Amino acid sequence: MRIFYNLLIYIIFLSAFSAPAWSAELTGLWQEYNDDTGNPEALIRIEKLSDNTYEGRIEKILPDTVENSALICISCPGSLRNHPLLGLRILSGLKRKDKLTFEEGEIIDPDDGNKYRCNIRLSEDGNTIEVTGYLTFNWIGHSEIWRRTR
């Protein structure tokens, strides 16, 4: 019986000091920031698809105004041209490499319509991601930090 109690105390101790269950998960709502001003620019919803890849869509443009909600992607390629920014899929094809790394994705910059390869690195605490877009080599790409929203 004493072994049972010791085991129970050990499990409670570990669960009290372990990271939240979602900390290693990419899914959720992320806040993206303007590189120049540092102001919040958009909320991106990242979801896991049935084929175990991840995609992200613009859920809200900030500030939340009628004008911003009516914006369209005039520079986007192909069928995405003139598509409303709200709901626009800007991330696609991301695959989990390990606990904190997601690779082989694609990201579209709705400002200029350019497509880039994309990798994402999730922080240990699950509260931020480093989103890197690049053409050939990820070490010469551009990275942004997005923060998880509750």
Image (spheres, rainbow, N blue to C red):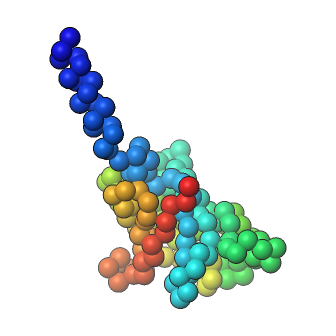
Is 123 positioned to the left or the right of 110 in the image?
Answer: left
- Position of the N terminus by quadrant: top left
Q: Nearer the viewer, residue 102 or 79?
A: 102
Please state the total of marks drawn on the protein image: 0
Report which quarter residue 33 is drawn in.
bottom right
Is 100 positioned to the left or the right of 25 in the image?
Answer: left
Is 90 positioned to the left or the right of 16 in the image?
Answer: right
How far from the left and from the top, in percent, is residue 9? 26, 27
> Residue lying furthest bottom in this view?
36
Reply above or below: 17 against 34: above
Q: Nearer the viewer, residue 120 or 21?
A: 21
Reply above or below: 122 against 136: above
> Residue lying furthest top in this view?
1
Q: Nearer the viewer, residue 48 or 136?
A: 48
Residue drawn 35% across and 83% down?
Answer: 140
How far from the left and from the top, in percent, is residue 62? 67, 73
Residue drawn 80% across and 78% down?
Answer: 67
- Position of the C terminus by quadrant: bottom right
Reply above or below: 126 against 107: above
Note whether residue 104 is visible: no
Residue drawn 55% across and 72% down?
Answer: 32
Report which quarter residue 58 is drawn in.
bottom right
How far from the left and from the top, in percent, is residue 108? 56, 74
Residue drawn 58% across and 80% down?
Answer: 39
Report which quarter residue 120 is drawn in.
bottom left
Note whether residue 30 is visible: yes
How far from the left and from the top, in percent, is residue 147? 49, 66
